[in-house]
Amino acid sequence: VAQAGFVLQLFKTLHRTRQQVFKNDARALEAARIKINEEFKNNKSETSSKKIEELMKIGSDVELLLRTSVIQGIHTDHNTLKLVPRKDLLVENVPYCDAPTQKQ
């Protein structure tokens, strides 16, 4: 029963992430909503703790990937995309180094 709380929490987190990542994109929002709901519905009768743990890991990985790797693009004309990164994606890059220091 304790797992049920974590499953519900992951379900809600995925939907919140979906709403942030695909904001203002009705088609992507709907497709993601359907996919999330389908995956949870398809596995709702799963009873194996090990299998539930595996599915939870996949769900967490998907949420992290969506949150950290997806950037929206808007077609400005037939050849150009304008990227719309969310504020939480705009992090400082580690400077590139041509001559990496040798690890001791």
Image: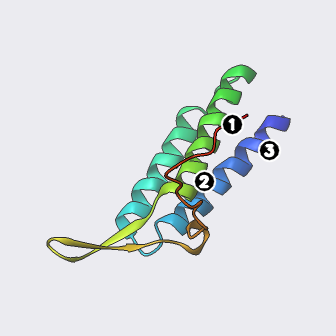
Point 66% across, 56% down: residue: 13
Quadrant assignment for the C terminus? top right
**Comparing marks 3 and 2, which lies closer to the viewer?**
2
Residues at discs 3 and 2 in contact (Cβ within 8 Å): no
Name the kind of residue labelled 2 in the image: Leu
For marks 3 and 2, the one nearer the N-term is 3
For marks 2 and 1, the one nearer the N-term is 2
**Comparing marks 1 and 3, which lies closer to the viewer?**
1
Name the kind of residue labelled 3 in the image: Gly
Residue 49 point in image, percent of width and height: 75, 23
**Front position in the image: 47 or 93:** 93
Whole-number angstrom distance, CA of label 3 to CA of label 2? 14 Å
Q: Which residue is mark 1?
A: 103
Residue 19 point in image, percent of width and height: 54, 66
Quadrant assignment for the N terminus? top right
**Front position in the image: 76 or 38:** 76
Q: Which residue is mark 2?
A: 14
* Residue density around tag 1, few if under 14, some if 14–19, many if 20 or more, within 10 Å: few
Point 44% across, 64% down: residue: 71
**Front position in the image: 55 or 94:** 94
Name the kind of residue labelled 1 in the image: Lys
Q: Secondary structure at mark 1?
A: loop
For marks 1 and 3, the one nearer the N-term is 3
Whole-number angstrom distance, CA of label 1 to CA of label 3? 44 Å
- From this view, report whether residue 23 is shown above or below residue 4: below
Point 53% across, 54% down: residue: 97
Q: Which residue is mark 3?
A: 5
Specify whether 85 is left or right of 1.
left
Residue 88 point in image, percent of width and height: 61, 69
Whole-number angstrom distance, CA of label 2 to CA of label 1? 39 Å
Q: Residue furthest left?
A: 78
